[in-house]
Amino acid sequence: MNPHSNSTNIPTVVLVHGAWADGSSWSRVIHDLQQSGVAVTAAPIPLTSLDDDVNAVTRAIDRTEGPVVLADHAYAGGVIGATSHPRVQALVYVAALAPDEGETVADVFYRDPSHPQAPELKPDGDGWIWLPTSAFAAAFAQHATAEEHAVLAAVQRPIAVACIQEPVPRPRWKDVPTWFLIADDDRMINPDTQRFMAERSNASTRIHKVDHAPLITRPDVVTEILSEAAQSLGH
């Protein structure tokens, strides 16, 4: 039996990590959801191109059964919006980017001014963008501990420039119920940008005074909005 399968009527939360991270960034949220009886799995994406990442999410969803709540962090908002899997019935954006049809992730990321402590993002000679080590404490997760900063920097995964330069197709948020957690203390994605995208997508919005990585620093608020989305599919 598929280890991630469940009753065809019970929703599964599928989590998609952002740039400079992997599925372990959701560890605390996964634990909290499992403790409350919510089926959950994390989709590993290669961060090589938008299409590659969408295909990886599709493969992860194929390993589940029943309705799916598809959730993302940061960059992966472009990925979940472009995912057309028929069992996706709700989207949850966590401190994320939600480009519209024809827009790129870079278009919305740079829509509003950057925070003074946001890092300068430049690709290396091979076209990969790495986050400067100091940026984890300064902007990515300023509310995390020094130990957490060290681990985040050590395990970070770079993102290919192609990921943020590919226009997205018609986004799924136009067709399914959507939730948006706005991180009001975000130094990576301007909170005003998040408010614009949440309003544009007609999302059920929650605003918290959290940093860019609440899945690490405030997993309780992330778990709450994910649980709400999952419960909405159970009725």
Image: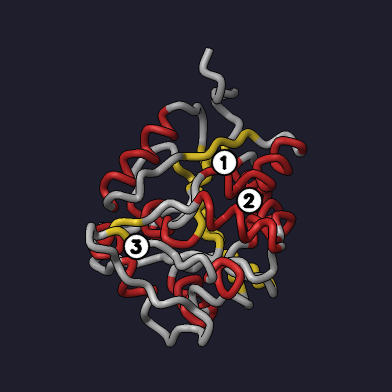
Three-letter amino acid code of the residue under disc 2? Leu
Q: Secondary structure at mark 3?
A: strand
Task: Answer left or right for 184 relative to 124.
Answer: right
Q: Secondary structure at mark 2?
A: helix
Task: Answer left or right for 63 relative to 47.
Answer: right
Quadrant in the picture for residue 31:
top right
Check if mark 1's residue and mark 2's residue have beta carbons within 8 Å: yes
Quarter of the C terminus within the rendering: top right
Q: CA distance from mark 3 to mark 1?
A: 29 Å
**Residue located beneath label 3 in the image:** 129
**Residue located beneath label 2 in the image:** 226
Three-letter amino acid code of the residue under disc 3? Ile
Earlier in the chain: of badge 3 and badge 1, it is 1
Answer above or below: position of 53 versus 184. Answer: above
Residue 89 image label: none
Q: Residue at x 51, y 57 (%)?
A: 73
Earlier in the chain: of badge 1 and badge 2, it is 1
**Residue located beneath label 1 in the image:** 13
Front residue of 142/53: it is 142
Instruction: State the image coordinates of residue 135 (x, y, percent, origin top left).
Output: 52, 70
Instruction: State the image coordinates of residue 132 (x, y, percent, origin top left).
Output: 46, 68
Three-letter amino acid code of the residue under disc 1? Val
Q: CA distance from mark 3 to mark 2?
A: 29 Å
**3 or 1: mark nearer the eye:** 3
Residue placed furthest toward the right: 35
Earlier in the chain: of badge 3 and badge 2, it is 3
